[in-house]
Amino acid sequence: MQDSFIELLKLLLPEIIVDYFELTSYKKGEEILHLYLKEINSIPKEYRQAKLSSKGFFDEITVQDFPIRGHQVYLHI
């Protein structure tokens, strides 16, 4: 079930969002859809050999995405 859910998200969201963020919750109103995404704390494969130091994450931002089935879509990242 989880794999099919991820494949469905890839059809709706850019693949890079699905690769580096997880959907934590959503809110659906009559005309608005809010998707809440949390960054996955993992190192991209191209940087795994480098010495990295985590500085934490930025504050949440909200991005308006393309509408889905007549609903305005807001990504809370």
Image (cartoon, rainbow, N blue to C red):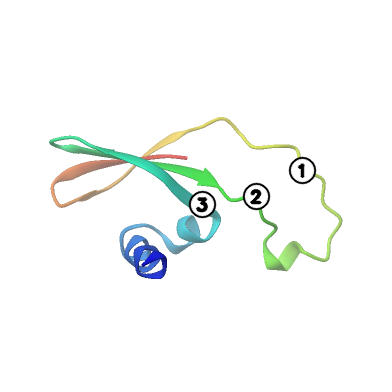
In the picture, which quadrant includes the N terminus?
bottom left
Q: Is residue 68 above or below residue 62?
A: below
- Answer with mark 3 or mark 1, whichever residue precedes in sequence: 3
Q: Is residue 62 above or below residue 7?
A: above
- The three-letter amino acid code for the residue at tag 2 is Asn
Q: Find residue 54 and name its label.
A: 1
Q: Give yes or no for contact between labels 3 and 1 (Cβ–Cβ under 8 Å).
A: no
Name the element at disc 1. Answer: loop
Instruction: Indicate left or right for 65 with 72 as reference.
Output: right
- Nearest the camera: 7 or 53? 7
Q: Which of marks 1 and 2 is in front?
A: 2
Instruction: Indicate left or right for 13 with 45 as reference.
Output: left
- The three-letter amino acid code for the residue at tag 3 is Phe
Q: Give yes or no for contact between labels 1 and 2 (Cβ–Cβ under 8 Å).
A: yes
Residue shown at 35% from the left, 60% from the top:
9
Q: Find residue 41 and name its label.
A: 2
Disc 3 marks which residue? 21
Instruction: Indicate left or right for 44 with 71 as reference.
Output: right
Question: Residue 33 at what x, y percent from top left?
Answer: 25, 40
Between the residue at mark 2 and the residue at mark 3, the CA separation in whole angstroms equals: 9 Å
Q: Give yes or no for contact between labels 2 and 3 (Cβ–Cβ under 8 Å).
A: no
Q: How many marks?
A: 3
Between the residue at mark 1 and the residue at mark 2, the CA separation in whole angstroms equals: 10 Å
Q: How crowded is mark 3: few (under 14 residues within 10 Å), some or many (20 or more)?
A: some
Residue shown at 71% from the left, 67% from the top:
46
Between the residue at mark 3 and the residue at mark 1, the CA separation in whole angstroms equals: 17 Å
- The three-letter amino acid code for the residue at tag 1 is Ser
Question: Residue 76 at what x, y percent from top left?
Answer: 42, 37
Residue shown at 48% from the left, 51% from the top:
22
